[in-house]
Image (tube, rainbow, N blue to C red):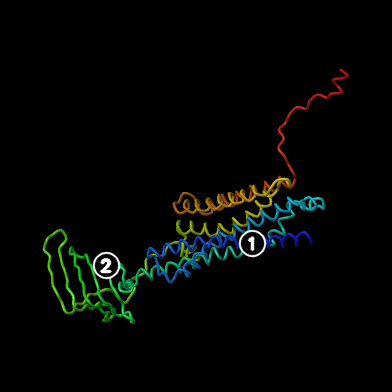
């Protein structure tokens, strides 16, 4: 049908342009935030692009849902503004007839949103957590950069190396400050090298001195050494901490089915249901006066989408706190929005208007005869 094909083509163009614009904005904001995290030492600066890619992937369900809603609003608003909808209405096409071509266009996007929210989102979050944890659990010597004071992973030591050799296994003008077991020690040496023994890393210092002092006391001890060894790390990574909820797979959440798990599931499944409901809202809300601009509808779409997403976040916290059940919330929010948008679309389709009952005025002709 000509109506269906022309509508789907325009929706595809609008959705593509909107998605590219939104992804560009998200990538820019993500890059700024990722660079800030790297500068604070959350992960290796060389992994910035990788972390940014995973982070953008976690935003894609949200971005695609918003792009679909804006594309529907913009396309239908343009058709109203150019009086195309009047022609289609005159040929017997009503608002409810838009549901079939709209969902026929949107079903691949809905499947992509569901796949991203249920599977890609937790996988990307788990990859980000692995990168951060691996960087946090690296050895103390791997943290050291020439010419920069660097704190150890446990916060008990501060290292400084003026210059590393080419093989990165030795350095010159080494400084180590340690606070441990109620004692403060400052060790300095002209040279230092890394030596591996079993699964432990040792820093062997040459030609230096060591200052030791008890915290709160004046019992300073000074000693000089020709060679001194200090353990600075282990070759084995520690046990992995409990994974954040956002990085747990959807199948695991469904199998555990605790309150927190169901709250996270409601957030992920909510993207699919929200995208489906927003299409009906777009059809009902896109009717405008051709003499007016379409800015109002675009502003409305942004507010409506933001309110829907905020309700998803609120429901996630309510379910996690056992304030409402999973099924009850899903039916209340998504079922309620579906019912309200369906009623709104029906009113617009039949052009029903609310006219309060009022008594008819007396007939002018009858008054003249009287």
- Neighbor class of circle 1 (other Cα within 10 Å; few <14, some 14-19, many 20+) is few
Residue at the left extreme, as displayed: 219
Q: Which residue is mark 2?
A: 158
Q: Is residue 257 above or below residue 196?
A: above
Name the residue at 73% across, 29% down.
358
Q: Which mark is residue 140?
A: none
Name the residue at 26% across, 67% down.
157
Residue at the right extreme, as displayed: 369
Question: Measured from the top left, where is residue 124 in percent x and y?
Answer: 49, 67
The answer to which of 340 and 183 lies nearer the viewer is 183
Q: Which mark is residue 17?
A: 1
Q: Secondary structure at mark 1?
A: helix
Question: Measured from the top left, where is residue 249 in percent x and y?
Answer: 48, 66
Q: Secondary structure at mark 2?
A: strand
Residue 355 picture quarter: top right
Question: Measured from the top left, where is residue 229 in percent x and y?
Answer: 21, 77
Name the residue at 18% across, 79% down.
227
The answer to which of marks 2 and 1 sits earlier in the sequence is: 1
Q: Is residue 34 left or right of residue 88?
A: left
């Amino acid at each position: 049908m000509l109506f269906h094909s022309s509508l789907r083509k325009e929706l595809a163009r609008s959705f593509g342009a909107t998605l590219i614009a939104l992804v560009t904005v998200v990538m820019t904001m993500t890059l700024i935030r990722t660079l800030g995290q790297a500068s604070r030492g959350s992960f290796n600066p060389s992994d910035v692009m990788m972390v940014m890619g995973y982070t953008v992937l976690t935003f894609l369900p949200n971005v695609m849902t918003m792009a679909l809603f804006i594309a529907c609003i913009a396309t239908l608003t343009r058709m109203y503004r150019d009086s195309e909808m009047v022609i289609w209405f005159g040929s017997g096409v009503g608002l409810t007839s838009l549901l079939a071509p709209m969902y026929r266009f949107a079903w691949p996007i809905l499947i992509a949103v569901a796949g991203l929210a249920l599977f890609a989102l937790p996988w990307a979050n788990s990859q980000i957590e692995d990168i951060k944890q691996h960087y946090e659990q690296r050895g103390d010597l791997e943290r050291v950069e020439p010419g920069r004071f660097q704190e150890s992973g446990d916060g008990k030591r501060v290292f400084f190396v003026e210059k590393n050799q080419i093989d990165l296994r030795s350095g010159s003008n080494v400084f180590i400050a340690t606070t441990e077991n109620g004692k403060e020690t400052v060790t300095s040496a002209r040279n230092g090298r890394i030596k591996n023994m079993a699964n432990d890393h040792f820093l062997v210092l040459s030609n230096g001195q060591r200052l030791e002092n008890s915290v709160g006391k004046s019992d300073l001890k000074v000693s000089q050494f020709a060679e001194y060894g200090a353990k600075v790390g282990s070759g084995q990574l520690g046990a992995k901490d409990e994974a954040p909820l956002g990085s747990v797979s959807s199948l695991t959440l469904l199998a555990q089915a605790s309150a927190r798990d169901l709250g996270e599931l409601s957030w992920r499944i909510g993207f699919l249901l929200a995208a489906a409901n927003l299409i009906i809202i777009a059809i009902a809300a896109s009717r405008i006066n051709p003499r007016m601009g379409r800015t109002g509808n675009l502003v409305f779409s942004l507010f409506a989408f933001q309110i829907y997403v905020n309700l998803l976040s609120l429901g996630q916290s309510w379910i996690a706190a056992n304030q409402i059940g999973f099924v009850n919330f899903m039916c209340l929010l998504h079922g309620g929005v579906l019912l309200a948008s369906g009623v709104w679309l029906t009113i617009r389709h039949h052009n029903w208007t609310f006219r309060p009952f009022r008594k008819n005025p007396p007939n002018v002709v009858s008054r003249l005869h009287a």
